[in-house]
Image (cartoon, rainbow, N blue to C red):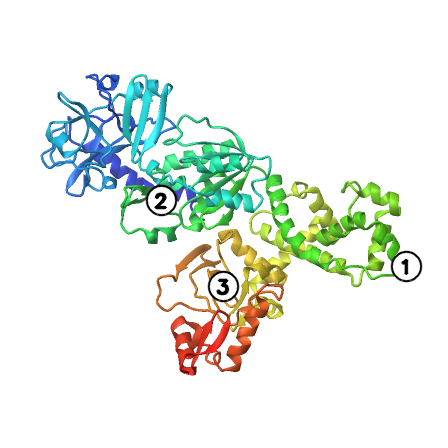
Amino acid sequence: MRQPVLDEYLDAAEPCVSEVRQKRSQAAAPRSRLPWADVVSKDISSPLLQSGNQPAVPGLHKKVGNGLADECHSPAPPSAHAALARGWGQHARQARCPSGRDNYLPRRGYRGSPRSCPHWCDIPGKGPQPTTSTAASAGGIMLGGTYPEYSERKANTTHMCRGQQRVTVSSAGVTVSALSRSAMTAMRRVELSRPIRIGLETGLIRGGDSIFDYGCGHGHDVEFLREMGHTADGWDPNHRPDGALRKASIVNLGFVLNVIEEPLERIEALKRAFDLAHRALIVAVRTVHEAKILSTASEYSDGVLTGTDTFQRFFAQAEAREFLDETLSAQSIPLGPGIFVVFRDESAEQDWLENRAALNRRVRRLRRIVEPRLSIRSKAYRENREILRLLEEFLALRGRLPITNEVPWEIELNELFGTLPKAFQVIRHEADEPWWEDAAADRRQELLVRFALQRLRKLPKFSALPPDVRADVKAHFGSYKRATEAAEELLFSLGKSEEVRSAATEARIGKRTPDALYVHVDAVDTLPAQLKVFVGAAETLIGDVPDATLIKIHIDKPRVSWLVYPKFDTDPHPALAESWVVDFRALDVRPNDYRSRENPPVLHRKELFVSPEHPRYELFKRLSTQEERHGLLEDSRRIGTRRGWQERLDELGWELRGHRLVRAHGG
């Protein structure tokens, strides 16, 4: 049986932590000790400068380039601060640190520049000065206060950040300190962060919800949410340390876990954030594919130090999900690569799933409601059209009539027509086709897909379903048991490749190849139920892929891929930018980046991927017809890449201007 994920996580991190502890215990003594969070003073009158205030935190020497840096660890850090006080140093070959060691350099994040070094020292006769080479050669000494003094001052101070410095203004003076590595990862945003944006787009964050941003950085998400009318607040150990930790409907833990260096502290932060959430916790972490963009990185603890001296712990998609599930003893739901939601209770999760699907149903099904043909029986319809329109919309969305006391307009309809079934008869006789039958079939299929996907995790209790969903189940299946049995049968049918192949053949939209079906993301709802479950099962591992254009359903392999073509609508033959492959055997996600490739794959016959209702369907189809007529699409293997396609155009003397095929100049 597999060892619990949380134990594996801590076991993997322990060698790194042990190494740091061993070095600390072996560090040379005596030497000057650092204050909590490197608090050093710029005001000679500050109590920080009084002699004899030596914090009881031993330093740890660690090699940095050709010099040494000093690092310390507090055995009992306060909750609002990181456990590691940041490194420090003096920039000068001739400089000597208080412990007598030569050649101290600033941390890598300061790039060796004395002007950017965020530490201050006391120059005899001159008072506090930045640790430039001049200051260091004059015998500057790093100064600081004890942690108890720091705690006492914290209640009556004002904090602000300047570059890589924290400036604290209080009655005791002005204190300047180095920001921690996690503080330097905070971004200044001009728009909502991705986890908050996805929370709004998916209906996770609703009107009237309170939102708390745990680890809010500079607080831009909080400001944006307040401008949108939400009740929002935030806390950050570096940029908003005085903020109160508050309970809220939704708590956001956005890109916080990946910058916490200590594995145990990471777990505590996750649990603390979840405790604050009334309904749900949104968690976002950096994924392993993002590590590829780092120009320089060195291993540190269970993550890496970047070229700007910030710590990052990158997670694989499956690893992040298992870490959340194991730590919180709850099942997380992926919202996208590296982004998850964990609900407090089953009912809240079911409500959200139902509301998330409702919008797609409304947009797709209301198109089916057709104008009634004129007849004698049309009089009742025309005179009561507004109230009957409400019944039509309900039928289109749920595929059934409302049950007693389910809708507020039931009394008015009963007064006009006697009963709801009699009102439905007016609609039935006036419609050209029985569109409500298609709506019922669609709703039945939606419920099957929903329960099949939840069977992969844990089926909810019938009582946990929203009341309208319980009514849907009874209307379309008779009982919850029958519905779940049918869903289980649908799920297990995916284990048979012939079932998947047959479903791919039945698909009305999509481009078929011998081993796959490609379909536009907007057309997934048109797929047969088996393929919807196939795609939905993959979404339980990856969530929503931002900017994805096409979905590739592998017929002979248990895989689903999301393909990103940024210029799908405007480029006649767009190039593939990236892909996300969900492998069911490995239960993991593999990203691929094609942007730097000289000869990426390109698309042809774009009209095959989209619904005929797509606004550019006719434009795509006209271009494909032209290209086929002139023999450009005959060698499908060769023209599948950008270079091969251009060579084919050159050979036959054609070029493209937008979505028009024209003769090349001189051709």
Residue 27 percent across, percent down from the top left: 18, 32
Q: Vertically, is 186 above or below 176? A: below
Q: Seen in the image, is 261 located left or right of residue 429?
A: left
Q: Earlier in the sequence, mark 2 or mark 3?
A: 2
Q: Position of residue 48 (x, y in %)?
A: 25, 19
How far apart are the two marked residues, 3 and 1, measured between alpha carbons? 50 Å
Q: Vertically, is 69 above or below 666? A: above
Q: Is residue 607 left or right of residue 467?
A: left
Instruction: Identify residue type, mark 2.
Output: Arg
Which residue is more in the foreground, 322 or 237?
Answer: 237
What residue does disc 3 label? 568
Could you tell me if residue 478 is visible in this image? no
Q: Which residue is mark 2?
A: 313
Q: Residues within 10 Å of mark 3 (few under 14, many from 20)?
A: some
Of callouts 1 and 2, the N-terminal one = 2
The mark closer to the camera, 2 or 3, is 3
Residue 177 versus residue 126: which sits nearer the camera? 126
> Answer yes or no: do the residues labelled 3 and 1 have beta carbons within 8 Å?
no
Q: Is residue 136 above or below residue 607?
A: above
In contact (CB < 8 Å): disc 1 and disc 2: no
**Mark 2 and mark 3: Cα distance apart in space:** 34 Å
Q: Residue furthest left?
A: 94
Residue type at the position of mark 3: Phe
The residue shown at (66%, 43%) is: 465
